[in-house]
Amino acid sequence: MKSLFEGIAYLFEEILFIPFNGMREMELESWTLANTLNWIFMLIAAAAMVYWVKQLKKFDDNNEERKDVTSHTYL
C-alpha cells in the first residue's frame, strides 16, 4: 500500500508538475511570463462573468423572472 502512495507522489511531483516547476524557475527572469497561466484564468473568469450578466439582463428584459414577495411556498 505504501508503494501505491509513493507512486502517486512520484507521478505528481516528478511528471505532472514539470510545467509548474518551469514557471517557478522562470519567475526570477520574467514575472509576466511566469504568471501567464494566472492571467489566462482571469480572462476566462471575466468572460464568463460578462456572459452571465448579459444572460441575466436578457431574462430581466423579457420579464421571465418571477418577482414574488416570497421565495418559498411555505412562507
Image: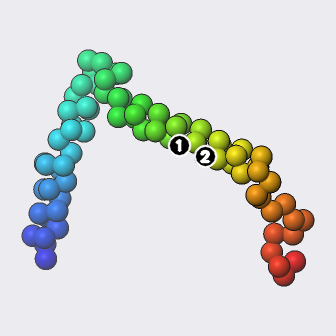
- Identify which amino acid the numbered label 1 is placed on: Ala
Q: Which residue is mark 2?
A: 52
**Quarter of the image where one finds residue 65:** bottom right
Viewer-proximal residue, 29 or 19?
19
- Please state, as top left, top right, bottom left or bottom right, where the N terminus lies in the image: bottom left
Pick out the residue farthest to the front.
Answer: 62
Q: Which mark is residue 48?
A: 1
Secondary structure under the numbered disc 2 in the rendered image: helix
Reply above or below: 35 against 21.
above
Which residue sits at x=70%, y=46%?
Answer: 58
Pick out the residue farthest to the top.
Answer: 29
- Please state, as top left, top right, bottom left or bottom right, where the C terminus lies in the image: bottom right
- The answer to whether marks 1 and 2 mark residues whose Cβ atoms lie closer than 8 Å is yes
**Quarter of the image where one finds residue 53:** top right
Secondary structure under the numbered disc 1 in the rendered image: helix
Q: Is residue 42 left or right of residue 58?
A: left
